[in-house]
Image: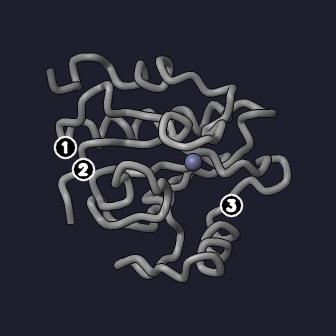
Amino acid sequence: MLKPRFIMIHHSAVSYMANADQFEANNNYHKAQWNFKSSMGFYLGYNYEIAKSGFIKQARQEGEQTAACYQENMNNGQCIHVCLDGNFDIEKPAPEQIYALRDLLRGLVKKYGIKKDNIVFHSAYAQKSCPGKNVDLLFVRSLVSSNVFKK
Ligand SMILES: [Zn+2]
């Protein structure tokens, strides 16, 4: 277990109009792909997944190895991976997802003293649009009020 220093944002790339809560589907998909079980008994590669309703499910402990981004050791536990259900190249995150993400980010930033610049997008590390062109990095960072960040 590592002390997390980064938080990476992802989307599932499947429209939430097709499936509003994709935890089960993604857990099964990742099981078929990698069969990499977490200490919590799940196969999902991310630490957290946020359904369209804003409901947050956890699949891996913070600091535990992940299967979410293969670049720059971002799977070794130093990064907490958060996936929002939806395809944000074609739709926008639901308000409930934004509120849930805000609360989750605030809690994690406070708990681990994560720096603002260390809230990152998958697209900065891999040749992907993840988490989609309709999600703005500065907006996501602004969800955490500046006095919560470590200076
Ligand atoms: Zn991603």
Indicate the quadrant containing the C terminus: top left, top right, bottom left or bottom right: top left
Label 3 beta carbon less than 8 Å to ligand 1: no
Q: Is residue 103 above or below residue 38?
A: above
Res 112 label: 1
- Residue 100 as seen in the image, left or right of residue 87: left
Count of marks placed on residues: 3
Location of residue 69 in the rendering, given as x and y in whole percent from the top left corner: 48, 53
Q: Quadrant of residue 29?
A: bottom right
Asked if disc 3 and disc 1 are in contact, CB closer than 8 Å, the reply is no
Q: Amino acid at mark 2?
A: Pro
Residue at image x 16%, y 26%? 150
| Secondary element at image label 3 | loop
Mark 3: give few (<14), some (14-19) or many (20+) Cα within 10 Å. Answer: many
Res 137 label: none
Res 4 label: 2
Location of residue 98 in the rendering, given as x and y in whole percent from the top left corner: 55, 33
Q: Is residue 117 above or below residue 68?
A: above
Residue at image x 18%, y 53%? 3
| Secondary element at image label 2 | loop
Residue at image x 52%, y 76%? 43
Q: Is residue 13 visible?
A: yes
Q: Quadrant of residue 8?
A: top left
- Residue 73 as seen in the image, left or right of residue 125: left
Asked if disc 1 and disc 2 are in contact, CB closer than 8 Å, the reply is yes
Location of residue 114 in the rendering, given as x and y in whole percent from the top left corner: 23, 36
Mark 1 vs 2, N-terminal side: 2
List the single residue furthest toward the left.
Answer: 151
